[in-house]
Each structure stands twice: as structure tokens, then as C-alpha cells.
Image (cartoon, rainbow, N blue to C red):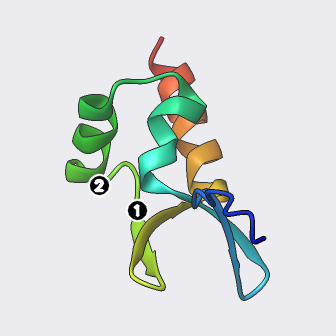
Amino acid sequence: MRVNTQVKPGFFWKAGRQYIALSEVPRMLNLTASEVADAVALGELQIERVSGCKVVSTAALFDYIGMKEGKK
């Protein structure tokens, strides 16, 4: 009997850099999806594609968090 476990994309590695799926960013940063969409539209978060999935590098997330903390 084969057990099917759901695999949810989340973290990716590409060329030695770690990425997180764009759909997981709001949950990880405790933001709304519209806040993340606004950050992408304003160019505050740069997205890339890995195997057809939109992802954000973890380095870019740390930069975004630092920028967001600096505004407070």
C-alpha cells in the first residue's frame, strides 16, 4: 500500500542560495497577502522563478524586514 503524503512547496535551493515560495511569505512574516503583493509591486521584494514557482530569496526577505523595521 502506498501512502500519499502531501508535499507543500516552501523552501528551495538554487545555485547555493535559499529561496522561499512567494505563497509562504505572508505566513512566515505574519503579513497579509496584499501587503506582500504591494511590496512586490513597489519593487521592495524581488521575485524569481524556480521550476515555474514564484520565489523570493531569503536574503531579500531579510533586507525587506530590515527596511520595514527602519521605517518604524
Q: Residues within 10 Å of mark 2 (few under 14, many from 20)?
A: few
| Residue drawn at x 42%, y 49% as measured from the top left | 23
Residue lying farthest to the top in this orientation: 72
Considering every residue shown, the one lying at the far front of the view is 1
Q: Position of residue 63 (x, y in %)?
A: 59, 46
Question: Which residue is drawn at the image coordinates 34% and 24% (left, top)?
Answer: 32
The relative height of residue 60 versus residue 14 in the rendered view (above or below) is: above
Give me the disc on residue 43: 2
Q: Quadrant for the N terminus, please.
A: bottom right
Q: Residues within 10 Å of mark 1 (few under 14, many from 20)?
A: some
Q: Label 2's element? A: loop
- Say how many tags the image has: 2
Specify whether 41 is left or right of 64. left
Q: Quadrant of residue 39?
A: top left
**Closest to the observer, 53 or 63:** 53
**Secondary structure under badge 1?**
loop
> Do tag 1 and tag 2 residues touch (Cβ < 8 Å)?
yes
Amino acid at circle 2:
Gly
Q: Check residue 46 in the rendering and tell me which mark sits there, or answer none.
A: 1
The image position of residue 50, as x and y in percent, is: 50, 81
Q: CA distance from mark 1 to mark 2?
A: 6 Å
In the image shown, does 12 or 7 lie closer to the viewer? 7
Q: Is residue 48 left or right of residue 67?
A: left
- Residue 44 in percent (x, y) is at 36, 48
Q: Which mark is residue 20?
A: none
Residue at 56%, 21% in the rendered image: 69
Q: Quadrant of residue 6?
A: bottom right
